[in-house]
Image (cartoon, rainbow, N blue to C red):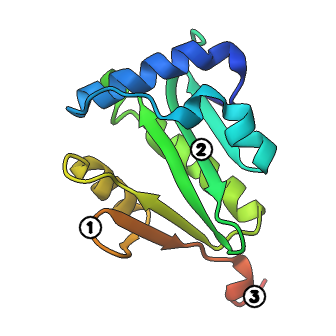
């Protein structure tokens, strides 16, 4: 598996993977409009979007983020893993990749909207990575630690 910035060559495969993942969650597999133009909706705004690719070059996961203007926060978006490949470390690898980039971009908070009932697995996943409920059970936030907040180790 490898993680790459989104490229248009993978658009249709990404869309199919996301629709399949939504269907596996029992959701009506509809497409979010931002996915139709990743360049305009993410990259042109200074945000990011990544794909996880299998060794065969197929899309097996996705994640993106959008900065919240005027804040030190971002929204994590479109975090999906191919349904048949869950619990194999793909989501963890995508998440850690995105979080590292978010930290390097100088952001201090990552927010997520879970979308209601049916996302119990997502809640557990995010709790594992230190997220707390923010407004209600559908919103979570993580405060990113900065190395500047901790005393340097004695060497």
- Which of the two discs, 2 and 3, sits closer to the camera? 2
Could you tell which of marks 3 and 1 lies nearer the N-terminus?
Answer: 1
Question: Which element carries disc 1, helix, strand or loop?
Answer: loop
Q: Is residue 8 left or right of residue 19?
A: right
Mark closer to the chain start, 1 or 2: 2
Residue 109, image quadrant? bottom right
Question: Disc 3 marks which residue?
Answer: 154
- What whole-number distance in Å separates the C-alpha atoms at marks 3 and 1? 41 Å
Quick one: SS at disc 3? loop
Q: Mark 2 highlights which residue?
A: 64
Q: Is residue 98 left or right of residue 131?
A: right
State how far apart marks 2 and 3 are (Cα): 37 Å
Determine whether, in the image, residue 131 is placed left or right of residue 83: right
Residue under the image location 56 percent in, 13 percent down: 12
Label for residue 90? none
- Is residue 58 at least partly visible in the picture? no
The Cα–Cα distance between marks 1 and 2, rounded to whole angstroms, is 21 Å
Seen in the picture, residue 72 relative to 45 is either above or below; the reply is below
Q: Residue 83: give x, y in percent of width and height.
A: 32, 26
* For residue 120, above or below residue 7: below
Residue at horizontal 68 percent and vertical 77 percent from the top: 146
Report the residue marked by disc 1.
137
- Residue 2 found in image quarter: top right
**Residue 85 image point, x, y percent:** 36, 25
**Which residue sits at x=74%, y=33%?**
39
Number of residues whose C-alpha sits closer than 10 Å to that of mark 3, classed few (under 14), some (14–19) or many (20 or more): few
At a point 63% along the width and 47% down the height, the residue shown is 97
Q: Is residue 103 above or below residue 35?
A: below
Quarter of the image where the N terminus is located? top right
Q: Earlier in the sequence, mark 2 or mark 3?
A: 2
Outermost front residue: 33
């Amino acid at each position: 598996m490898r993680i790459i910035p989104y490229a248009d060559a993978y658009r249709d495969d990404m869309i199919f993977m996301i629709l399949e993942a939504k269907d596996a969650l029992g959701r009506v597999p509809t497409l979010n409009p931002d996915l139709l133009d990743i360049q305009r909706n993410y990259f042109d705004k200074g945000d990011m979007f990544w794909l996880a690719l299998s060794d065969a070059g197929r899309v097996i996961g996705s994640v993106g983020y959008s900065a919240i203007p005027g804040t030190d926060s971002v929204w994590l978006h479109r975090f999906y893993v191919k349904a048949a490949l869950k619990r194999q470390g793909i989501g963890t690898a995508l998440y850690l990749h995105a979080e590292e980039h978010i930290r390097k971009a100088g952001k201090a908070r990552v927010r997520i909207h879970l979308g209601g009932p049916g996302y119990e697995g997502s809640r557990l996943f995010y709790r594992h990575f230190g997220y707390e409920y923010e407004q209600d059970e559908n919103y979570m936030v993580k405060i990113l630690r900065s190395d500047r907040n901790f005393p340097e180790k004695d060497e």
